[in-house]
Image: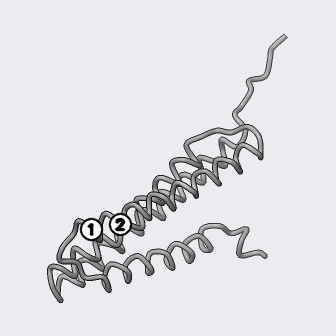
Amino acid sequence: MKQAKKSVPGTKFTKWTRAKVKIIFQIQMAVTLVITLATLLHSVVAAYSALIGGILYLLPNVFFAWRVLGRQSETPRGILADMYIGEIWKMVISILCFAAVFILVQPLSPFPLFLTFILLQILNWYLQMKVDDRFLKL
């Protein structure tokens, strides 16, 4: 008798999700570079502050995506636990990175830093809605 191959639960969905998340991160990196170049017209400090703001947003989010999508939990409880743990670590990384930037980077222009960070957050919400067709059907 032939035994059917056991497939890892959610593999097809995870591959689709990884591809969409990768596209979202690429768009966010491109927007960060555009904002950095635009603020370069104002000053170099504003430009690298904007770049740092983009990095401060992307670094914890890339970690979260790696944490959640890189694991193959087999139960809903395990998936949810991975998401909660990933979100907690994302917050810790964000806090530590912001603290390190404000302590170590001088001079720093806070307006471009926070503007880039906030714009990437809004862009993320928008892209999530556009990527997930199921959300639009609600």
Dot 2 falls on a residue whose secondary structure is: helix
Label 2 sits on residue: 99
Q: Residue at x 74, y 24 (%)?
A: 5
Query: How many numbered marks are there?
Result: 2
Residue found farthest to the top: 1
Callout 2–callout 1 Cβ contact below 8 Å: yes
Residue 9 relative to residue 45: left or right: right
Give the image location of residue 123, x and y in percent.
49, 77
Q: Nearer the viewer, residue 26 or 76?
A: 76
Q: Position of residue 78 (x, y in %)?
A: 72, 43
**Residue at (27% x, 68% y) in the render:** 103
Q: Quadrant of the C terminus?
A: bottom right
Type of amino acid under label 2: Ala
Identity of the amino acid at label 1? Ile
Report, in whole angstroms, how far the alpha carbon at label 2 lies from the one at label 1.
6 Å
Across and down, in percent, residue 45 comes to 17, 79
Where is mark 1, residue-wise? 103
Q: Residue at x 47, y 52 (%)?
A: 63
Compared with 24, 117 (above or below) is: below
Q: Quadrant of residue 37?
A: bottom left
Mark 1 packing: few (<14 Cα in 10 Å), some, or many (20+)?
few
